[in-house]
Amino acid sequence: MNEKTVSVYGYGRFGKLWADILAEDYRVKVYSQRGLASGDVPSGIEVCDEQGIFDCDALFFCVAISSFGEVLGRVRKYCQKDTVFFDTCSVKVYPAQWMQEQLPEGSLIIATHPMFGPDSYNLQGDLVMVMCNISTSDPVFNEWALYFASKKLRIEIMTPEMHDEKAAYSQGITHYMGRLFDDLQLQPTSMDTYGYLSLLQVTKQTCNDSWQLFLDLQKYNPYARQMRDDLKKSIEKIDLALDKS
């Protein structure tokens, strides 16, 4: 067991998964604004109040994108100089900017996006962890990159801008189509193809996440509007080709 103390701020579906992963190697503390009792977390994980959670070597914010800025403003007074701060938001440009603006000057910051969630973590396949070095030394950043690689995650190092542009056309469009299929009320039939079953699985997986996450993915990714515009243009182009055929 590593002697470092690692905190998880936010104990929703993803925060719980993240705390469980970290607890395999570190002493882990958790905090939730909704309140937690010791019986709400697995044995070995410590429940803290909002101030106590910041007494740690590293802290992961696992909160909704739309509330992240407000959280940073409120907890700035608790932040300690040598703590490494991470976000885990599904977009990167705005969270990285917010951390730079609102955490104390000189804070050690790594922006991350674990490209999986509670529904996909235990599935077979290639799980990706995006990391953006915002304001840490190379040794600190590399130490954490090696740690996540040891958890059998494929590390992708890029800028927040690169992440959001790629994610708009991968994660963003997947969640958009999942909500579209859900609105169409697609149902299994007695003659489903594997392709159609895959669409139903996309619907189930994306709609198991909150509506707030869907809104945040579209609102806080600066490339999401262009993705949706491109999608609409492609639909119109194909419809026009069908009309002409």
Image (spheres, helix red, strand yellow):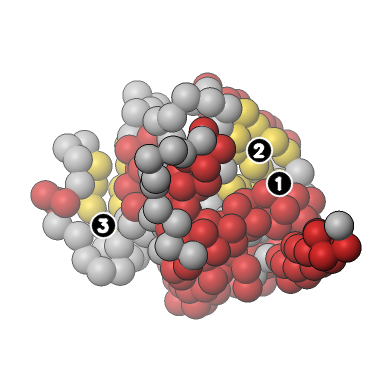
Q: State the image coordinates of residue 40 (x, y, percent, origin top left).
A: 16, 51
Q: Residue at x 65, y 56 (%)?
A: 173
Instruction: Indicate the secondary structure of the residue bearing disc 3.
Output: loop
Q: Residue at x 53, y 26 (%)?
A: 125
Residue under pointer 2: 141
Left of 226 or right of it: where is 88?
Answer: left
| Cα gap from disc 2 to disc 3, whole angstroms | 26 Å
Left of 239 or right of it: where is 122?
Answer: left
Q: In this view of the protein, can residue 57 be seen by the observer?
A: no
Q: Residue at x 88, y 63 (%)?
A: 244
Residue under pointer 3: 48
**What quarter of the picture does the N terminus occupy?**
top left
Residue under pointer 1: 133
Label pair 3/1, CB-CB below 8 angstroms: no
Q: Is residue 106 above or below residue 16?
A: below
Q: In this view of the protein, can residue 158 be seen by the observer?
A: yes
| In-front residue for pair 194/100 | 194
| Cα gap from disc 2 to disc 1, whole angstroms | 7 Å
